[in-house]
Amino acid sequence: MTFNGWVQIALYALLVTACVKPLGLYMVRVYAGERTFLSPLLKPLEATIYRLCRVEPAKEQHWTNYTVSLLVFSAAAFLFTYLTQRLQQFLPLDPQHLGAVSPDSSFNTAVSFSSNTNWQDYGGETTMSYLTQMAALTVQNFVSAAAGMALAIALIRGFARTSAKTVGNFWADLVRGVLYMLLPLSLVMALVLVWLGVPQNLDPYTHATTLEGAKQIIAQGPAASQIAIKQLGTNGGGFFNVNSAHPFENPNAITNLIEMWAILVISAALTYTFGVMVKNTRQGWALFAVMGILFLGGVSATYWAESYPSAAIAAAHVDAKSGPLQAGGNMEGKEVRFGIANSAIWAAATTDASNGSVNSMHDSYTPLGGLVELVNIQLGEIVFGGVGSGLYGMLLFAIVAVFIAGLMVGRTPEYLGKKIEGREVKMAMLAILILPLSILGFTALAVVLPQGLSSLANAGPHGFSEILYAYTSGTGNNGSAFAGLNANTPFYNATIGFAMLIGRFLFIVPMMAVAGSLAGKKIVPASSGTFPTTGPLWVGLLLGVILIVGGLTFFPALSLGPIAEHLAMLAGQQF
């Protein structure tokens, strides 16, 4: 750990925080259908899309119709992505003449991108044609992210409205999220990345001869455009197999900072959007404070764990004749051009934000470093979280927190003037408990079946951690992995695919039920008995509920994995 490293962490946090208010205000105007500085350019296009799709943006939907619209759209997106992969060999823009993707991998990838997970069990440059990367995967990066943002706005409307029967129009929210948010930001970011050295072309791969005379194939393609949206939309799927550790995806320190900033900026700004829409910006800043504390705690713990690996790791390096550890800490699996501090920031941000992209290999982290990344996802992907999904996940935890506060004082709990009753609490807890049910259930299945164990590259607790991470990442719609697990098998493609479906869509349905229920309630004026939800006491209570309800659920599993591995490492045993 160095002073320079802490300065980099502080600079990153300041850059994200500085964008929260302006971007949050802009999103308020976008989703209200108000005029923005982009309206003269994009309003005619927006109107044309509505006309072609026969959408009446002013006609709002009941929460059930809103949810059905999302599910139908996601099903169509899944089918399109699946068929594009299966028919790839017959489609254009395939200069490498790549064949059709296997049925099980196509299923897994179609689920992954339509659920905004972007889990990848394949090498992008050796599996997917340019057309598949652009028309199927990149398009899903836009629309699945916009769908998550739309859902968050629908839940905010549930808090903000009184005695209402509707929560908005899904199709209008989807179109506005893509047109006014994701497309402009992605266009600017892609141009900046191209300027900084990221390739953007449709050329065949380059055949080169090295100085030693060896033959090498250098992959390229339309990388910058996909990298921009994968970060801004918290998608994370890499154009290249090693993701943003690849020098074409992430050439230097400046691109690294820009891509890390993009991971959190929209999710962070949505907290201010929430505050403005409920007419109390302090509420939004309180949620931002909770997210920020958890993020800084995670990045600090990761930075410490990777900077001070135990003597057992250093001894193992020497015994393996790989030489002593590099000065500064555990550099295994990390790019020298980024170092430990920037690797720790990225690892924390990507697992906090359900992004899944990496600039270092999480499987090579110390046991405690890997533990932090696991916990970040297992908390429910609410530490900023995915665009939209992080905010609505955090709001469900807020509902549980005010319910607990109400029990403490013997009063019907309230949040933002809405009475929180049995229906809302039950739906919130149902959504929250779906995640551990999927993660722990599929992990238990994989560790007892030969099909699950046969894919492990490591034995003992680290092998268990690899399986636990796979289902944590899938259910949490994150997409990162402990790469020692070969997940490109029919068993893992199917089970992780179902885990992604559960984590995305079975969470959404009860959440939208909460939105509909809240929208129909009247706003009750605050009284002397109302629990304040803007100060340090509220921040502490919400943090406690998240850590206890979201975190302790997984403690037994974590004890069998990274905690056991850490204790074994201290005793000199490596896995």
Image (spheres, rainbow, N blue to C red):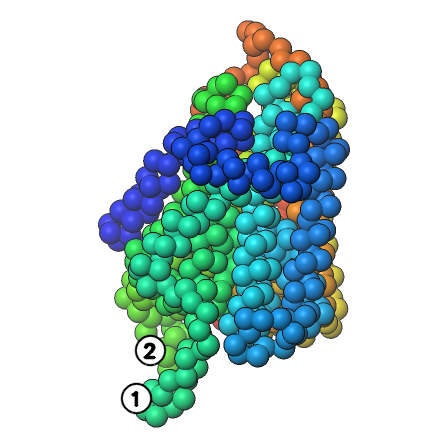
Residue 83 place in picture, x, y as percent: 69, 64
Q: In this view, does 244 lie to the left or right of 432?
A: left
Q: Mark 1 points at which residue?
A: 211
> Is residue 6 at all visible to an observer of this figure?
no
Residue 553 place in picture, x, y as percent: 64, 45
- In the displayed structure, 351 sits above or below 530; it is below
Residue 19 place in picture, x, y as percent: 37, 36
Residue 329 place in picture, x, y as percent: 33, 63
Q: Which of pointers 2 and 1 lies earlier in the amino acid sequence?
A: 1
Residue at 63 percent across and 31 percent down: it is: 57
Q: Is residue 338 left or right of residue 244?
A: left
Near mark 2 (Cα within 10 A), the count class, few <14, some 14-19 or many ≥20, is few
- Residue 24 placement: quadrant: top left
The secondary element bearing badge 2 is classed as: loop
- In the displayed structure, 73 sits above or below 28; it is below
Q: Which residue lies furthest to the bottom in this view?
A: 213
Q: Name the residue under label 2.
A: 323
Q: In this view, does 13 lie to the left or right of 41?
A: left
Residue at 72 percent across and 22 percent down: it is: 165
Task: Report if the CB atoms under discs 2 and 1 are less than 8 Å apart.
Answer: no
- Residue at mark 2 to residue at mark 1: CA–CA distance: 26 Å
Query: Label 2 is placed on what type of residue?
Result: Gly
Residue at 57 percent across and 12 percent down: it is: 530
